[in-house]
Amino acid sequence: MLRCMAKRVFIIHGWGGDPGSNWFPWLKEMLEKRGMEAVVPRMPDSENPKLAAWLETLRKAVGGPDAETFMVGHSLGCITILRYMQGLGDEDKIGGAVLVAGFTEDLGIKQIANFLDEPVDWKRINARCKRFVAIASDNDGYVPLRQSEILKEKLGAKVLMQQGMGHFNMAELHVALNELLKIIG
């Protein structure tokens, strides 16, 4: 299991999301109760997202990444995290990442296609972070199960398959996401 020594955790919402939606406030509160700094940046124009603006927002929020920096992404937040890692300097590293309903291929949604215009640089990402967990649901209506297999193959991610959790986009799902707390600390 991916255990980390996170002191700072960045929770990146997805398309149409915001810091107060879904399970993000719950996770932030739980992490803070455990003495960690938890940040849920508001990604710009989440209904019509642009990769460059999301990356800039994430860079500013994180500042200097280090081995005690951990990231949790949901859906579009996952590819944002991977693109962020891809753009880090050669010496920069983060401690780990959890990718909830993550994907790295075009899902046929035109509003988010700009996040997938370029191929993913797996080698560069793997050089910036060695610990990944992918959390997927057997009935996600947006992200095919094949995507978690890609994350497993390309990143060595441990895949945690959940039953009947859809796209993990309801506040009540925090019960199923208790695994996040075990992973992060």
Image (spheres, helix red, strand yellow):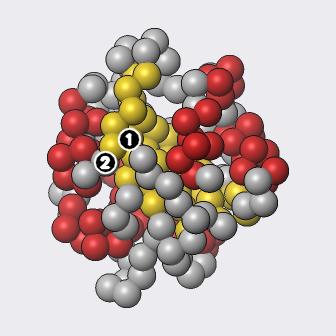
* Residue type of the residue flagged with mark 2: Ala
User: Which residue is at a point 34% across and 37% down the rendered structure image?
Assistant: 159
Q: Is residue 33 left or right of residue 73?
A: right
Q: Residues within 10 Å of mark 1 (few under 14, many from 20)?
A: many
Where does residue 111 sit, x and y in percent of width and height? 40, 39
Location of residue 50 with respect to 107 vertically, above or below: below
Q: Is residue 109 left or right of residue 98?
A: left
Q: Quadrant of residue 5?
A: bottom right
Question: Which residue matches tag 2?
Answer: 157
Check the image and name the residue furthest to the bottom.
91
Location of residue 43 with respect to 105 vertically, above or below: below
**For the residue labelled by badge 1, is the local secondary structure a helix, a strand or a loop?**
strand
Residue 179 in sight: yes
Residue 141 in sight: no
Question: Which residue matches tag 1?
Answer: 134
User: Which residue is at a point 24% across and 44% down the rendered structure image?
Assistant: 152
Q: Are marks 1 and 2 in contact (CB under 8 Å)?
A: yes
Where does residue 21 sit, x and y in percent of width and height? 69, 34
| Front residue (pair 148, 84) | 148
* Residue type of the residue flagged with mark 1: Ala
Which comes sooner in the sequence, label 1 or label 2?
A: 1
The CA span between labels 1 and 2 is: 6 Å
User: Which residue is at a point 43% across and 15% down the rendered structure image?
Assistant: 163
Where does residue 175 sit, x and y in percent of width and height? 65, 24
Q: Which mark is residue 42?
A: none
Q: Is residue 127 left or right of residue 67?
A: left
User: Which residue is at a point 45% across and 60% down the rendered structure image?
Assistant: 96
